């Protein structure tokens, strides 16, 4: 049962890691119309008329969102590595538990990042631009949060399941 739950958690963790990386690296968190042209905005830069520019204004919500997303990626990577190392070295219960905690932490950090971004976007950009919407990178971030939480829960359940089962006896009966 450990391999099924921990394996499912590791697969969900790998999917969450890929989605977190794609979500963090792309420039399509929000789309809006600026001076009659379609514009995209990401965590690192914004694009208008197919020309991308780095964010020049350092605003606390940008920095907080970036920091939490990068920490979420690193935590998810640690959870996946710990989950995979549990399979290579036999059943290492502590690694499965620690990997599960790292994956849940990753989901929580990404949730904080997206909550900050959502709050600022709705209150500030929602009033400033009439024709705006969240884009696919932002939505991928929410899917990654769900996968990271699921991966962490799978690995924590695998740990709980193996600690609750009695160890098999090695005494021969003959």
Image (spheres, rainbow, N blue to C red):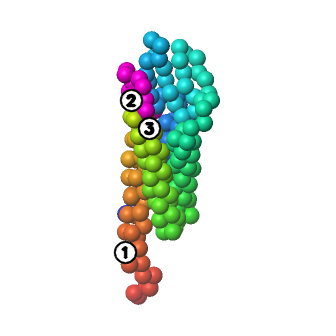
- Residue in view at x 55 percent, y 15 percent: 50
Q: Residue at x 38, y 29 (%)?
A: 126
Name the residue at the top extreme: 36
Where are the magenta residues, as a range? 124-138
Q: What distance separates the C-alpha of mark 2 from that of mark 1? A: 51 Å
Give whichever of 36, 124 is nearer the camera. Answer: 124
Horizontal relation, residue 50 to residue 10: left or right: right
Q: Which residue is mark 2?
A: 126
Q: Earlier in the sequence, mark 3 or mark 2?
A: 3
Q: Is residue 111 above or below residue 172?
A: above
Question: As displayed, is residue 82 above or below residue 91?
Answer: above
- Mark number displayed over residue 164: 1
Task: Tell which tag, 2 or 1, sits nearer the viewer.
Answer: 2
In depth, the one of 5 and 168 nearer the eye is 5
Q: Position of residue 66 (x, y in %)?
A: 55, 41
Task: Work out how far the residue at label 3 is from the one at label 2, CA to CA, in angstroms.
Answer: 9 Å
Q: Most extreme residue toward the bottom, as rendered?
A: 174
Residue 120 image-quadrant placement: top left
Asked if the magenta segment contains residue 77, the reply would be: no
Counting labels gives: 3
Tell me the residue at 44%/56% (across/down).
104
| Residue occupying the point 52% across, 41% down | 61
Q: Quadrant of the N terminus?
A: bottom left
Q: Position of residue 108 (x, y in %)?
A: 44, 53
Element assignment for label 3: helix
Query: How many C-alpha atoms fall within 10 Å of the one at disc 1: few (<14), some, or many (≥20)?
Result: few
Judge by depth and name the residue closer to the eye, 104 or 8. Answer: 104
Query: Which of the labelled discs sits on residue 154, or is there none?
Result: none
Q: Secondary structure at mark 1?
A: helix
Q: Residues within 10 Å of mark 3 (few under 14, many from 20)?
A: some
| N-term mark: 2 or 1 | 2
């Amino acid at each position: 049962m450990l391999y099924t739950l921990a394996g499912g958690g590791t697969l969900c963790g790998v999917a969450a890691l890929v989605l977190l990386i794609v979500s963090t690296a792309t420039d399509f968190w929000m789309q809006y119309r600026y001076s009659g042209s379609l514009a995209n905005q990401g965590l690192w830069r914004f694009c208008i008329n197919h020309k991308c520019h780095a964010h020049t204004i350092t605003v606390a919500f940008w920095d907080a969102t970036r920091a939490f997303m990068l920490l979420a990626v690193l935590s998810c990577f640690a959870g996946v590595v710990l989950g995979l190392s549990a399979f290579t070295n036999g059943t290492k219960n502590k690694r499965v538990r620690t990997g599960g905690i790292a994956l849940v932490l990753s989901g929580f950090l990404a949730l904080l990042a997206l909550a900050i971004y959502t709050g600022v976007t709705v209150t500030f950009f929602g009033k400033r631009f009439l024709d705006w919407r969240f884009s696919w990178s932002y939505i991928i971030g929410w899917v990654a949060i769900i996968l990271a939480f699921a991966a962490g829960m799978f690995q924590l359940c695998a740990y709980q399941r193996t600690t609750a089962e009695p160890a098999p006896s090695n005494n021969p009966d003959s």
